[in-house]
Image: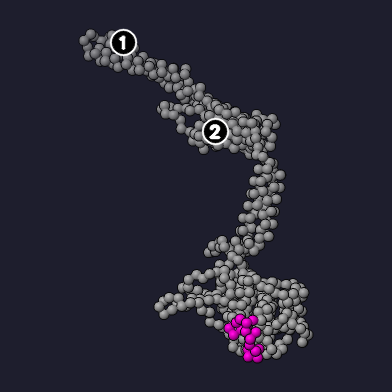
């Protein structure tokens, strides 16, 4: 099964989105590490070192020791068992092994590090293991010497038997020579045989003398060579308490963070909600016209105050202004035109802003757009057309008696579709249930927009919204994204088919989408607005 590659940027975005949870998990991990450090206080440690003997092979070559072999021998029961018996109270080989770590610093030096809860036990363990290793090496050398002595004795006996046979043959040959005549062939042959037997006798005697010397001096080269403790057990020490707790806290926090990243990565791979503006634009099939910061409210008073005194930031004001200019060019600079142009000669404009249920951040975009338009000099009407229980507080704030005064200068708010000939811009709010999407408002507008926040809807949700809007005889003119993620590298201003072969565009700019047109000579012909999609109703 093919595994998806870990998207580092998406993971960082997810961690940033849940930063308070991440901090809480890190703190819990650090506290768990401190608790573990309290339950397992730092141990005392003591170190001793043993120098192994440098023996020789039977052929005179020096013995080459294998560090891993020597370490395994020193860690075996034949060494740790006697070491544990030297302690008071005594310990088994398995118990000693849990407290001791043995390494081979070189081929001939063993380093023994013992750890225990008390300094006395740590020093006693290091010393006992060192002494047990020395005793084992000495015992092993004694066994080798005994075996060698037995071999030498057996060989000496063999030589003695050969010498006895040679002596008997010399006596027989001497008798044959003495009985033969002075010039007889038998006498000559006996003399030759006696010469050979005498030489063989001398050689056997020489070998027997050498074996006797070896038996007196011992076998395996230097019989006095044995292991030596070159460093006695050092005074036991342990890390400072602050360092011990700090290391455990850092380890616990790091482990908790890694575990959370893994869990978030698994959840993120199963999460089908759209978070990038390019993904949102592709799902709807319309470009992202603007990205604004939402000022979502929870109460009736909060929504009323938003419509009365909304003041966007400079970036959001520019994004909303470019959106109105993109959708309704004849309303551009409405504040300036409103001073010198009779309202009767202006063409009213209308826009339907569709948001999904329970997306409070996207729900606030329509009131913000209407309030900004009114503050810009356009006589604006905000109509709460299709309600949903998740937006009950906003609908209550919009419910006003006919003829009631404006919420703010130039802004009328109502829940019915009254005559729009007296206003410049009508903003119709529609909230669609994502489980049973339908568009039932009778109000027809010039353009239709979809507003949503990243991470709130899936591609299926947006596709159902697009189908509902299309079934109602309308066309989606664009998307407004509320509260885009600051780590989102995309803009959503071009659809997937338009992005193929296009150079990378700036990613964090807001406002109306623009593309570069190419002049007749191949040069840039300047920036042009994307084709405007309008219902023309």
241 or 158: nearer the viewer:
241
Badge 1 vs badge 2, beta-carbon distance below 8 Å: no
Name above or below for residue 41 compared with residue 330: above
On residue 69, which mark appears? none
Name above or below for residue 110 compared with residue 446: above
- Evaluate whether residue 434 shows in this view: no
Task: Label 1, secondary structure: give it.
Answer: helix
| Left or right: where 60 falls relative to 416 | left
Q: Earlier in the sequence, mark 1 or mark 2?
A: 2
On residue 110, which mark appears? 2
Task: Label 2, secondary structure: give it.
Answer: strand
Residue 186: x, y in percent?
24, 14
Residue 198: x, y in percent?
32, 14
Split into 4 quadrants, where in the image is the C terminus?
bottom right
On residue 175, which mark appears? 1
Residue 375: x, y in percent?
68, 78
The residue segment tinted magenta is: 329-346
Name the colouring of the figure: one colour
Name above or below for residue 71 compared with residue 325: above
């Amino acid at each position: 099964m093919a595994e998806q590659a870990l998207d580092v940027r998406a993971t960082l975005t997810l961690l940033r989105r849940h930063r308070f949870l991440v901090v809480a998990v890190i703190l819990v991990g650090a506290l768990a590490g401190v608790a573990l450090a309290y339950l397992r206080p730092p141990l005392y440690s003591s170190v001793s070192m043993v120098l192994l003997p440098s023996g020789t092979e039977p052929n005179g070559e020096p013995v080459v020791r294998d560090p891993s072999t020597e370490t395994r021998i020193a860690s075996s029961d034949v060494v740790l068992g006697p070491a544990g018996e030297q302690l008071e109270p005594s310990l088994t080989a398995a118990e000693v092994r849990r407290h001791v770590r043995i390494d081979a610093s070189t081929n001939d030096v063993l380093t023994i590090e013992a750890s225990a809860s008390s300094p006395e036990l740590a020093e006693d363990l290091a010393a006992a293991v060192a002494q047990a290793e020395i005793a084992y090496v000495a015992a092993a050398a004694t066994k080798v010497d005994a075996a060698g002595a037995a071999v030498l004795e057996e060989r000496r006996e063999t030589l003695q038997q050969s010498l006895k046979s040679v002596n008997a043959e010399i006596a027989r040959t001497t008798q044959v020579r003495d009985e033969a005549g002075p010039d007889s062939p038998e006498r000559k042959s006996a003399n030759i045989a006696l010469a050979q037997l005498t030489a063989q006798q001398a050689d056997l005697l020489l070998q027997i003398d050498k074996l006797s010397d070896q038996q007196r001096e011992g076998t395996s080269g230097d019989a006095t060579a044995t292991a030596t403790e070159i460093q006695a057990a050092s005074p036991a020490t342990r890390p400072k308490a602050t360092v011990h707790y700090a290391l455990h806290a850092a380890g616990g926090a790091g482990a908790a963070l890694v575990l959370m990243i893994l869990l978030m990565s698994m959840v993120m791979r199963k999460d089908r909600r759209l978070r990038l503006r390019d993904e949102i634009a592709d799902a709807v099939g319309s470009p992202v016209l603007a990205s604004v910061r939402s000022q979502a409210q929870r109460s009736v008073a909060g929504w009323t105050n938003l419509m009365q005194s909304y003041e966007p930031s400079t970036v959001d004001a520019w994004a909303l202004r470019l959106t109105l200019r993109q959708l309704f060019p004849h309303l551009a600079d409405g504040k300036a035109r409103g001073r010198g142009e009779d309202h009767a000669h202006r063409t009213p404009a209308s826009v339907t802003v569709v948001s999904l249920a329970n997306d409070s951040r996207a729900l606030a975009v329509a009131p913000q757009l209407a309030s900004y338009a009114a503050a810009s000099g356009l006589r604006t009407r905000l109509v709460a057309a299709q309600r949903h229980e998740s937006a009950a507080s906003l609908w209550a704030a919009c419910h006003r008696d006919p003829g009631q005064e404006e919420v703010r200068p130039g802004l009328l708010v109502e829940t019915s579709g009254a005559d729009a000939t007296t206003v410049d811009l009508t903003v119709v709010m529609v909230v669609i249930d994502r489980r049973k999407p339908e568009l039932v408002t009778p109000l027809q507008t010039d353009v239709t927009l979809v507003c949503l926040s990243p991470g709130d809807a899936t591609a299926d949700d947006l596709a159902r919204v697009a189908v509902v809007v299309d079934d109602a005889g309308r066309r989606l003119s664009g998307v407004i994204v509320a509260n885009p993620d600051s780590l989102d590298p995309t803009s959503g201003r071009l659809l997937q088919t338009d992005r193929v072969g296009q150079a990378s565009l700036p990613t964090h700019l807001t406002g109306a989408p623009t593309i570069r047109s190419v002049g007749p000579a191949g040069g840039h012909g300047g920036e042009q607005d994307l084709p405007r999609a309008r219902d023309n109703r």
